[in-house]
Amino acid sequence: MTTNFIALTYKNTINGDLLVLKVFQNCEMIVAVNNQYTNLEGLNWNVPNIIKEYPDLEGKPVGEIKLEGIRRFKDHMRGLLTWDAKKNDLTRSLEPHGYKLQFWVRPDGRLQKS
């Protein structure tokens, strides 16, 4: 059985939050924090962090910054050619915020502990 997504489960070592990311081949994502589900657009994006990542967005309207940040993030994820690369990139970006990968569901449907 092969799926068109991976599912990653993280636990925040600071506040205990559980974060589940379901990443599809087209880099759309479903995000769940403590069983509250949304997509990327529904997250509360931190504008200063977006500007830090993409300095050319500074001075633009907040709504435009968020939409462009999401678009660029998805483009970045699409550029990562393997599921492992996507998993590793997401894990690397979440670790500074206290999130540790607990386990993930591989595209072949197998559960793998981190």
Image (cartoon, rainbow, N blue to C red):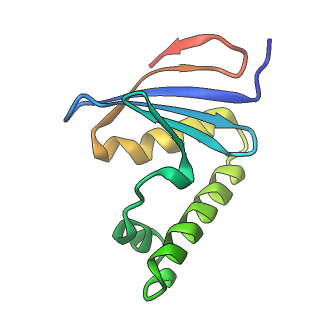
Residue at position x 43%, y 43% from top?
A: 92
Place of residue 3 in the rendered image (x, y in percent of width and height, measured from the top left)? 76, 22
- The answer to whether 40 appears left or right of 93 in the picture is right
* Numbered marks: total: 0
Place of residue 9 in the rendered image (x, y in percent of width and height, measured from the top left)? 46, 25
Residue at position x 47%, y 83% from top?
A: 61
Outermost residue toward the bottom in this view: 59
Image quadrant holding the N terminus, namely top right
Place of residue 72 in the rendered image (x, y in percent of width and height, measured from the top left)? 61, 64
- The answer to whether 13 appears left or right of 75 in the picture is left
In the rendered view, would you say 57 is above or below 46? below
Residue at position x 68%, y 45% from top?
A: 27
The answer to which image quadrant residue 17 occupies is: top left
Outermost residue toward the right in this view: 1
Query: Which residue is nearer to you in this view: 39 or 7?
Result: 39
In the rendered view, would you say 111 is above or below 12? above
Image quadrant holding the C terminus, namely top left
Place of residue 6 in the rendered image (x, y in percent of width and height, measured from the top left)? 64, 28
- The answer to whether 79 appears left or right of 29 in the picture is right
Query: Which residue is nearer to you in this view: 71 or 32?
Result: 32
The answer to which image quadrant residue 58 occupies is: bottom left
Residue at position x 34%, y 41% from top?
A: 95
In the rendered view, would you say 21 is above or below 59? above
